[in-house]
Image (tube, rainbow, N blue to C red):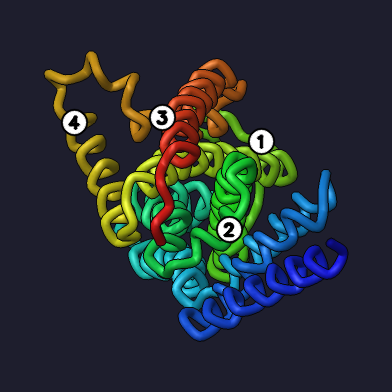
Amino acid sequence: MDGVDGRTRMDSVAEKSMGNRVAEELTGNHVATAAGHGVESFSMSGTRAVVRLLRSEIGLTFRRPRNLALLAVLAVVPVLIGVAIRVAAGDGADFVGQVAGNGLVLAFAAFFVMVPLVLPLAVGVVAGDSIAGEASLGTLRYLLTAPAGRTRLLVLKYLNVVVFAVAACGLVAVSALVTGLLLFPVGPVTLLSGSTVPLAEGLLRIGLVALYAAAGMAALGALALAISTLTEAPIGAIAATLVLVVVAQVLQAIPQLAVIEPYLLTSWWNKFDGALRDPIAFDQMGQGLLAFGAYILVFGSIAWARFTSRDITA
Protein backbone atom coordinates (compact mmCIF):
# COMPACT_ATOMS: atom_id res chain seq x y z
CA MET A 1 0.00 0.00 0.00
CA ASP A 2 2.86 2.39 0.76
CA GLY A 3 4.29 1.71 -2.69
CA VAL A 4 0.94 2.43 -4.33
CA ASP A 5 0.55 5.68 -2.39
CA GLY A 6 4.07 6.71 -3.32
CA ARG A 7 3.44 6.06 -7.01
CA THR A 8 0.16 7.99 -6.81
CA ARG A 9 1.88 11.00 -5.28
CA MET A 10 4.66 10.82 -7.89
CA ASP A 11 2.10 10.62 -10.70
CA SER A 12 0.28 13.64 -9.26
CA VAL A 13 3.48 15.67 -9.10
CA ALA A 14 4.41 14.64 -12.64
CA GLU A 15 0.95 15.62 -13.89
CA LYS A 16 1.23 19.06 -12.31
CA SER A 17 4.70 19.54 -13.74
CA MET A 18 3.48 18.52 -17.19
CA GLY A 19 0.60 20.95 -16.89
CA ASN A 20 2.97 23.73 -16.00
CA ARG A 21 5.24 22.90 -18.96
CA VAL A 22 2.30 22.82 -21.35
CA ALA A 23 1.12 26.14 -19.93
CA GLU A 24 4.55 27.66 -20.45
CA GLU A 25 4.63 26.48 -24.05
CA LEU A 26 1.19 27.93 -24.68
CA THR A 27 1.45 31.36 -23.14
CA GLY A 28 4.82 31.87 -21.50
CA ASN A 29 5.52 33.37 -18.14
CA HIS A 30 1.98 34.63 -17.57
CA VAL A 31 0.57 31.12 -17.64
CA ALA A 32 3.44 29.71 -15.60
CA THR A 33 2.63 32.22 -12.90
CA ALA A 34 -1.08 31.49 -13.27
CA ALA A 35 -0.43 27.78 -12.79
CA GLY A 36 1.65 28.69 -9.76
CA HIS A 37 -1.43 30.39 -8.35
CA GLY A 38 -3.25 27.08 -8.30
CA VAL A 39 -0.33 25.27 -6.61
CA GLU A 40 0.04 28.02 -4.01
CA SER A 41 -3.66 27.83 -3.17
CA PHE A 42 -3.07 24.29 -1.97
CA SER A 43 0.30 24.78 -0.26
CA MET A 44 -0.47 28.00 1.65
CA SER A 45 -3.38 29.25 3.71
CA GLY A 46 -4.70 32.34 5.36
CA THR A 47 -3.63 35.92 4.93
CA ARG A 48 -0.13 35.13 3.70
CA ALA A 49 -1.48 33.11 0.77
CA VAL A 50 -3.95 35.83 -0.17
CA VAL A 51 -1.27 38.52 -0.06
CA ARG A 52 1.11 36.49 -2.21
CA LEU A 53 -1.56 35.70 -4.77
CA LEU A 54 -2.67 39.33 -4.92
CA ARG A 55 0.94 40.51 -5.23
CA SER A 56 1.49 38.12 -8.11
CA GLU A 57 -1.70 39.26 -9.86
CA ILE A 58 -0.80 42.93 -9.44
CA GLY A 59 2.72 42.26 -10.71
CA LEU A 60 1.34 40.63 -13.85
CA THR A 61 -1.02 43.55 -14.44
CA PHE A 62 1.63 46.23 -14.11
CA ARG A 63 4.14 44.32 -16.24
CA ARG A 64 1.90 43.87 -19.25
CA PRO A 65 3.00 46.18 -22.09
CA ARG A 66 -0.61 47.04 -22.95
CA ASN A 67 -1.35 48.19 -19.41
CA LEU A 68 1.89 50.15 -19.24
CA ALA A 69 0.88 51.87 -22.48
CA LEU A 70 -2.47 52.78 -20.92
CA LEU A 71 -0.74 54.25 -17.88
CA ALA A 72 1.57 56.20 -20.18
CA VAL A 73 -1.45 57.69 -21.94
CA LEU A 74 -2.96 58.64 -18.57
CA ALA A 75 0.27 60.41 -17.65
CA VAL A 76 0.55 62.24 -20.98
CA VAL A 77 -3.01 63.56 -21.26
CA PRO A 78 -2.68 66.04 -18.34
CA VAL A 79 0.55 67.29 -19.91
CA LEU A 80 -1.24 67.88 -23.21
CA ILE A 81 -4.07 69.67 -21.41
CA GLY A 82 -1.58 71.87 -19.61
CA VAL A 83 0.31 72.74 -22.80
CA ALA A 84 -2.97 73.52 -24.59
CA ILE A 85 -4.06 75.82 -21.77
CA ARG A 86 -0.66 77.50 -21.71
CA VAL A 87 -0.92 78.21 -25.44
CA ALA A 88 -4.52 79.45 -25.14
CA ALA A 89 -3.92 81.45 -21.96
CA GLY A 90 -4.25 84.77 -23.78
CA ASP A 91 -7.76 84.25 -25.16
CA GLY A 92 -9.46 85.56 -22.01
CA ALA A 93 -11.62 82.50 -21.28
CA ASP A 94 -12.50 82.31 -17.57
CA PHE A 95 -11.65 78.63 -17.16
CA VAL A 96 -8.42 78.87 -19.13
CA GLY A 97 -7.43 81.95 -17.17
CA GLN A 98 -8.15 80.25 -13.85
CA VAL A 99 -5.94 77.29 -14.73
CA ALA A 100 -3.21 79.53 -16.11
CA GLY A 101 -3.28 81.57 -12.91
CA ASN A 102 -2.79 78.56 -10.62
CA GLY A 103 -1.17 75.26 -11.60
CA LEU A 104 -3.13 73.31 -8.96
CA VAL A 105 -6.34 73.91 -10.89
CA LEU A 106 -4.89 71.84 -13.74
CA ALA A 107 -5.39 68.70 -11.62
CA PHE A 108 -9.11 69.42 -11.32
CA ALA A 109 -9.32 70.19 -15.03
CA ALA A 110 -7.57 66.92 -15.89
CA PHE A 111 -10.13 64.88 -13.96
CA PHE A 112 -13.04 66.76 -15.55
CA VAL A 113 -11.64 65.87 -18.98
CA MET A 114 -10.50 62.29 -18.30
CA VAL A 115 -13.18 60.83 -16.02
CA PRO A 116 -15.90 60.56 -18.70
CA LEU A 117 -13.94 58.32 -21.10
CA VAL A 118 -10.15 58.10 -20.76
CA LEU A 119 -10.03 56.63 -17.26
CA PRO A 120 -12.98 54.26 -17.96
CA LEU A 121 -11.11 53.02 -21.04
CA ALA A 122 -8.02 52.12 -19.00
CA VAL A 123 -9.93 50.47 -16.16
CA GLY A 124 -12.35 48.74 -18.54
CA VAL A 125 -9.47 47.12 -20.43
CA VAL A 126 -7.94 45.67 -17.25
CA ALA A 127 -11.24 44.58 -15.69
CA GLY A 128 -12.77 43.22 -18.90
CA ASP A 129 -9.68 41.13 -19.51
CA SER A 130 -9.44 39.77 -15.96
CA ILE A 131 -11.52 36.59 -16.38
CA ALA A 132 -12.19 36.45 -20.12
CA GLY A 133 -8.48 36.91 -20.83
CA GLU A 134 -7.57 33.90 -18.69
CA ALA A 135 -10.24 31.84 -20.45
CA SER A 136 -9.06 32.85 -23.91
CA LEU A 137 -5.45 31.96 -23.05
CA GLY A 138 -6.48 28.58 -21.68
CA THR A 139 -5.10 29.31 -18.20
CA LEU A 140 -8.32 29.60 -16.24
CA ARG A 141 -8.49 25.90 -15.43
CA TYR A 142 -5.05 26.08 -13.78
CA LEU A 143 -6.32 28.84 -11.51
CA LEU A 144 -9.39 26.79 -10.61
CA THR A 145 -7.81 23.49 -9.66
CA ALA A 146 -10.03 23.57 -6.56
CA PRO A 147 -13.71 24.60 -6.86
CA ALA A 148 -13.55 26.15 -3.38
CA GLY A 149 -11.00 28.62 -4.68
CA ARG A 150 -13.30 30.36 -7.16
CA THR A 151 -14.65 32.96 -4.75
CA ARG A 152 -11.19 33.86 -3.52
CA LEU A 153 -9.86 34.09 -7.08
CA LEU A 154 -12.72 36.39 -8.09
CA VAL A 155 -12.11 38.63 -5.07
CA LEU A 156 -8.40 38.79 -5.87
CA LYS A 157 -9.14 39.66 -9.48
CA TYR A 158 -11.40 42.49 -8.36
CA LEU A 159 -8.89 43.77 -5.80
CA ASN A 160 -6.34 43.86 -8.60
CA VAL A 161 -8.72 46.03 -10.65
CA VAL A 162 -9.22 48.35 -7.66
CA VAL A 163 -5.46 48.71 -7.21
CA PHE A 164 -5.10 49.58 -10.89
CA ALA A 165 -7.94 52.13 -10.65
CA VAL A 166 -6.31 53.81 -7.63
CA ALA A 167 -2.92 53.82 -9.38
CA ALA A 168 -4.46 55.27 -12.55
CA CYS A 169 -6.21 58.12 -10.72
CA GLY A 170 -3.13 58.78 -8.62
CA LEU A 171 -1.01 58.95 -11.76
CA VAL A 172 -3.38 61.49 -13.32
CA ALA A 173 -3.22 63.65 -10.19
CA VAL A 174 0.59 63.51 -9.95
CA SER A 175 1.08 64.19 -13.66
CA ALA A 176 -1.29 67.16 -13.55
CA LEU A 177 0.37 68.57 -10.42
CA VAL A 178 3.87 68.28 -11.86
CA THR A 179 2.75 69.84 -15.14
CA GLY A 180 0.96 72.64 -13.31
CA LEU A 181 4.04 73.38 -11.21
CA LEU A 182 6.23 73.56 -14.32
CA LEU A 183 3.94 75.61 -16.55
CA PHE A 184 1.98 77.89 -14.23
CA PRO A 185 2.33 79.80 -10.98
CA VAL A 186 1.05 78.07 -7.85
CA GLY A 187 -0.76 79.55 -4.88
CA PRO A 188 -4.05 79.53 -2.95
CA VAL A 189 -6.90 77.87 -4.83
CA THR A 190 -10.12 79.65 -5.76
CA LEU A 191 -13.02 77.21 -5.49
CA LEU A 192 -16.20 76.98 -7.55
CA SER A 193 -18.07 78.68 -4.72
CA GLY A 194 -15.80 81.72 -5.07
CA SER A 195 -13.89 81.35 -1.79
CA THR A 196 -10.14 80.78 -1.62
CA VAL A 197 -8.33 78.04 0.32
CA PRO A 198 -4.63 77.77 1.17
CA LEU A 199 -2.21 75.78 -0.95
CA ALA A 200 -2.03 72.87 1.50
CA GLU A 201 -5.80 72.54 1.62
CA GLY A 202 -5.91 72.69 -2.17
CA LEU A 203 -3.57 69.70 -2.30
CA LEU A 204 -5.77 67.79 0.14
CA ARG A 205 -8.82 68.50 -2.03
CA ILE A 206 -6.98 67.17 -5.08
CA GLY A 207 -6.33 63.97 -3.14
CA LEU A 208 -10.02 63.78 -2.26
CA VAL A 209 -10.95 64.19 -5.92
CA ALA A 210 -8.53 61.41 -6.93
CA LEU A 211 -9.93 59.03 -4.31
CA TYR A 212 -13.52 59.76 -5.35
CA ALA A 213 -12.64 59.20 -9.01
CA ALA A 214 -10.94 55.91 -8.06
CA ALA A 215 -14.11 54.79 -6.28
CA GLY A 216 -16.11 55.53 -9.43
CA MET A 217 -13.65 53.52 -11.52
CA ALA A 218 -13.83 50.67 -8.99
CA ALA A 219 -17.59 50.56 -9.54
CA LEU A 220 -17.00 50.39 -13.28
CA GLY A 221 -14.48 47.61 -12.62
CA ALA A 222 -17.20 45.53 -10.93
CA LEU A 223 -19.44 45.99 -13.97
CA ALA A 224 -16.64 45.01 -16.36
CA LEU A 225 -15.71 42.02 -14.20
CA ALA A 226 -19.29 40.75 -14.34
CA ILE A 227 -19.25 41.06 -18.13
CA SER A 228 -15.87 39.30 -18.21
CA THR A 229 -17.37 36.24 -16.52
CA LEU A 230 -19.99 35.95 -19.28
CA THR A 231 -17.60 35.44 -22.18
CA GLU A 232 -14.28 33.92 -23.15
CA ALA A 233 -13.50 36.80 -25.53
CA PRO A 234 -11.70 39.63 -23.68
CA ILE A 235 -12.18 42.05 -26.58
CA GLY A 236 -15.91 41.47 -26.36
CA ALA A 237 -15.96 42.14 -22.61
CA ILE A 238 -13.92 45.33 -23.00
CA ALA A 239 -16.02 46.56 -25.93
CA ALA A 240 -19.28 45.83 -24.10
CA THR A 241 -18.08 47.78 -21.07
CA LEU A 242 -17.13 50.83 -23.11
CA VAL A 243 -20.36 50.69 -25.11
CA LEU A 244 -22.36 50.70 -21.87
CA VAL A 245 -20.37 53.72 -20.66
CA VAL A 246 -21.06 55.64 -23.86
CA VAL A 247 -24.74 54.67 -23.91
CA ALA A 248 -25.14 55.76 -20.28
CA GLN A 249 -23.59 59.13 -21.05
CA VAL A 250 -25.86 59.60 -24.06
CA LEU A 251 -28.94 58.77 -21.97
CA GLN A 252 -27.69 61.13 -19.28
CA ALA A 253 -27.58 63.97 -21.81
CA ILE A 254 -31.26 63.56 -22.84
CA PRO A 255 -33.44 65.85 -20.67
CA GLN A 256 -36.54 63.71 -21.19
CA LEU A 257 -34.77 60.79 -19.49
CA ALA A 258 -33.78 62.70 -16.38
CA VAL A 259 -35.82 60.27 -14.29
CA ILE A 260 -33.29 57.48 -14.88
CA GLU A 261 -30.22 59.66 -14.38
CA PRO A 262 -29.72 58.71 -10.69
CA TYR A 263 -29.46 55.06 -11.73
CA LEU A 264 -26.72 55.66 -14.29
CA LEU A 265 -23.19 55.10 -13.02
CA THR A 266 -21.76 57.83 -15.23
CA SER A 267 -24.04 60.48 -13.72
CA TRP A 268 -22.14 60.22 -10.42
CA TRP A 269 -18.58 60.31 -11.74
CA ASN A 270 -18.24 64.09 -11.89
CA LYS A 271 -19.72 64.66 -8.45
CA PHE A 272 -16.16 65.05 -7.23
CA ASP A 273 -16.76 68.75 -7.91
CA GLY A 274 -18.20 68.73 -4.39
CA ALA A 275 -14.57 68.90 -3.25
CA LEU A 276 -14.29 72.26 -5.02
CA ARG A 277 -16.95 73.93 -2.91
CA ASP A 278 -16.80 75.60 0.47
CA PRO A 279 -17.75 73.81 2.57
CA ILE A 280 -17.07 70.51 0.85
CA ALA A 281 -20.33 68.98 -0.42
CA PHE A 282 -19.96 65.74 1.52
CA ASP A 283 -23.67 64.97 1.08
CA GLN A 284 -23.37 65.04 -2.71
CA MET A 285 -20.16 63.01 -2.72
CA GLY A 286 -21.59 60.62 -0.13
CA GLN A 287 -24.55 59.87 -2.39
CA GLY A 288 -22.10 59.17 -5.20
CA LEU A 289 -20.15 56.75 -3.00
CA LEU A 290 -23.39 54.99 -2.09
CA ALA A 291 -24.21 54.63 -5.78
CA PHE A 292 -20.75 53.21 -6.43
CA GLY A 293 -21.20 50.78 -3.55
CA ALA A 294 -24.56 49.66 -4.95
CA TYR A 295 -23.00 48.99 -8.35
CA ILE A 296 -20.16 47.04 -6.76
CA LEU A 297 -22.61 44.96 -4.71
CA VAL A 298 -25.00 44.22 -7.57
CA PHE A 299 -22.48 43.45 -10.29
CA GLY A 300 -20.09 41.79 -7.88
CA SER A 301 -22.92 39.42 -6.96
CA ILE A 302 -23.65 38.78 -10.64
CA ALA A 303 -19.97 38.05 -11.27
CA TRP A 304 -19.83 35.69 -8.27
CA ALA A 305 -23.02 33.84 -9.24
CA ARG A 306 -21.80 33.34 -12.80
CA PHE A 307 -18.19 32.54 -12.01
CA THR A 308 -18.85 30.02 -9.25
CA SER A 309 -21.39 28.11 -11.32
CA ARG A 310 -19.89 28.13 -14.83
CA ASP A 311 -18.23 25.13 -16.44
CA ILE A 312 -14.58 25.93 -17.15
CA THR A 313 -13.57 24.52 -20.51
CA ALA A 314 -10.51 26.70 -21.16
As drawn, 305 above or below 15: above
- Choose between 7 and 69: the one closer to the eye: 7
Q: Which residue is depicted at the point 12% across and 18% down?
A: 256
Q: Which residue is mark 1?
A: 197
Mark 1 residue element: strand
Q: Which residue is mark 2?
A: 143
Residues marked 4 and 2 touching at CB (< 8 Å) = no
Disc 2 to disc 1, C-alpha distance: 51 Å
Mark 3 residue element: helix
Amino acid type, callout 3? Trp
Pair 3/1: label in front: 3
Q: In the rendering, at what x and y percent does residue 156 appear?
A: 63, 48
Q: Which label was assigned to residue 268?
A: 3
**Location of residue 147 by image quarter:** top right
Mark 4 or mark 2: which comes first in sequence? 2
Q: Classify residue 166 as left or right of residue 68.
A: right
Q: In the rendering, at what x and y percent does residue 102 appear?
A: 56, 53
Classify mark 2: residues with Cα within 10 Å, few (<14), some (14-19) or many (20+).
Answer: many
Mark 2 residue element: helix
Amino acid type, callout 4? Leu
Q: In the rendering, at what x and y percent does residue 6 appear?
A: 82, 69
Amino acid type, callout 2? Leu
Mark 2 or mark 1: which comes first in sequence? 2
- Choose between 38 and 187: the one closer to the eye: 38
Mark 4 residue element: helix
Q: Quadrant of the C terminus?
A: bottom left
